[in-house]
Image: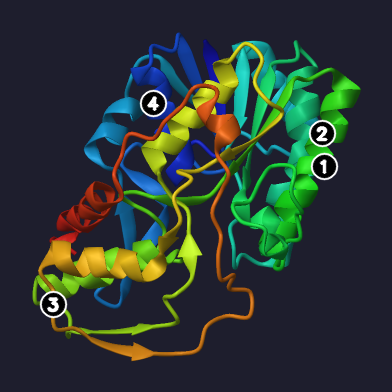
């Protein structure tokens, strides 16, 4: 397969590139807004009260310098720029992993999660309609009226701007794909975890803070909101395998939840990290939660399992790797 990946220097994009190369892809094209950088993610992480560059884990650094990987800067809103890239590379499939994230400002949410789809779909369809795998999110369900697990044909009622723009992006992609004859698959990815996870997500924040506490670099205290909500955590490597399966499957479903299918209380993540780091005895100060917090969220993964697909990575092992990731921050 010749694969194009948007958002190729982000957390999910980097893993998609690495996994595709490991699976024997003929060539992988990375697309992004940022200049190429083979040493770090595009985001920073907080470490000891400062923002520092988030380094790439070793496996992702190796993938970045693989001869089969090429990178191009492109504005996905620019149809002509995307068309030019498509003419040169001629991919068999495109995985659209570029996105603005929860808590980004409104203009960025609209530009990345909605407007970019016009250039992306029309640009690649100007050559030959490669299959498009649109990376969406479990946030499109909102609370799904309490109907858990969340099924692909269930209600989608996002309760914050991020989920709303991603849900709108699904419709935009569907309409444009029909107009251009582009085969489209939507993968609704649930709560990603793995080394380098942004600390705007609670597991990433906990990994940084507990790692520092365990090493005696920070006071043994945390300030946290309610932890009784449940989520569906999936290792970034498992998510990449699932999305690549959607790109390669002969006749995949048009809409698939990409998740573990396991309902996990957020408190469990905290407890495991404290145990793994040997950081017992922490003082935890409680604060109020967010209005947009959802009490229960996990996925029906029947369609994903039928590909077939099953996750390989255990929650405990992934959290241990997330804690270990911060050993690279010793020099900062």
Q: Is residue 184 above or below residue 163?
A: above
Residue that numbered label 2 is attached to: 174
Q: Which of marks 3 and 2 is nearer the N terminus?
A: 2
Q: In this view, does 213 lie above or below 61?
A: below
Residue that numbered label 1 is attached to: 171
**Inter-mark Cα distance, 1 to 3:** 47 Å
**Inter-mark Cα distance, 1 to 4:** 28 Å
Which class describes the residues within 10 Å of circle 1: few (<14), some (14-19), or many (20+)? few
Residue at the image point whose x is 41% and y is 65% from the top: 265
- Of residues 149 and 236, the one nearer the viewer is 149
Using the rendered image of the protein, determine whether residue 159 is visible from the camera's viewpoint: yes
**Inter-mark Cα distance, 1 to 2:** 5 Å
- Secondary element at tag 4: helix
Q: Earlier in the sequence, mark 1 or mark 4?
A: 4
* Color theme of the render: rainbow
x, y percentage for residue 199?
40, 64
- Secondary element at tag 3: loop
x, y percentage for residue 332?
19, 64
> Is there CB contact under 8 Å for labels 3 and 2?
no
> Is there CB contact under 8 Å for labels 4 and 3?
no
Which class describes the residues within 10 Å of circle 4: few (<14), some (14-19), or many (20+)? many
Q: Which of marks 1 and 3 is in front?
A: 3
**Inter-mark Cα distance, 4 to 3:** 36 Å
Q: Which of marks 4 and 2 is nearer the N terminus?
A: 4
Residue 288 numbered tag:
none
Q: In this view, does 304 lie to the left or right of 330?
A: right
Using the rendered image of the protein, determine whether residue 78 is visible from the camera's viewpoint: no
Residue that numbered label 3 is attached to: 280
């Amino acid at each position: 397969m010749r694969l194009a990946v948007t958002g190729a220097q982000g957390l999910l994009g980097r893993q998609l590139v690495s996994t595709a190369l490991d699976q024997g892809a003929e060539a992988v094209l990375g697309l992004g807004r940022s200049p190429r950088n083979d040493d770090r993610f595009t985001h920073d992480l907080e470490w000891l009260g400062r923002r520092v560059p988030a380094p790439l884990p070793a496996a992702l650094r190796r993938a970045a310098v693989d001869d089969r990987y090429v990178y191009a800067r492109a504005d996905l809103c620019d149809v002509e720029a995307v068309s030019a890239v498509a003419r040169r590379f001629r991919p068999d499939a495109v995985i659209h992993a570029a996105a603005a994230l929860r808590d980004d400002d409104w203009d960025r949410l609209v530009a990345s999660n909605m407007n970019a789809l016009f250039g992306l779909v029309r640009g690649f369809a100007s050559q030959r309609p490669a299959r498009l795998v649109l990376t969406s999110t479990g946030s499109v369900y909102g609370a799904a009226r309490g109907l858990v697990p969340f099924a692909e044909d269930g209600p989608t009622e996002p309760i914050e701007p991020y989920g709303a723009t991603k849900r709108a992006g699904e419709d935009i992609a569907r309409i444009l794909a029909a107009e251009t004859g582009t085969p489209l698959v939507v993968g609704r990815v649930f709560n990603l975890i793995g080394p380098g996870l942004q600390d705007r997500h609670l597991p990433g924040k906990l990994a940084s803070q507990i790692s520092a506490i365990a090493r005696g670099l920070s006071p043994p205290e945390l300030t946290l909101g309610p932890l009784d909500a449940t989520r569906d955590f999936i290792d970034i490597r498992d998510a990449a395998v699932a999305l690549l399966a959607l790109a390669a499957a002969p006749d995949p479903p048009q809409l698939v939840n990409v998740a573990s299918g396991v309902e996990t209380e957020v408190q469990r993540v905290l407890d495991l990290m404290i145990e793994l780091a040997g950081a017992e005895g922490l003082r935890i100060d409680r604060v109020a939660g967010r209005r947009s917090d959802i009490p229960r969220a996990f996925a029906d993964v029947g369609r994903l399992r039928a590909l077939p697909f099953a996750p390989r990575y255990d929650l405990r092992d992934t959290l241990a790797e997330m804690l270990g990731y911060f050993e690279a921050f010793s020099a900062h």
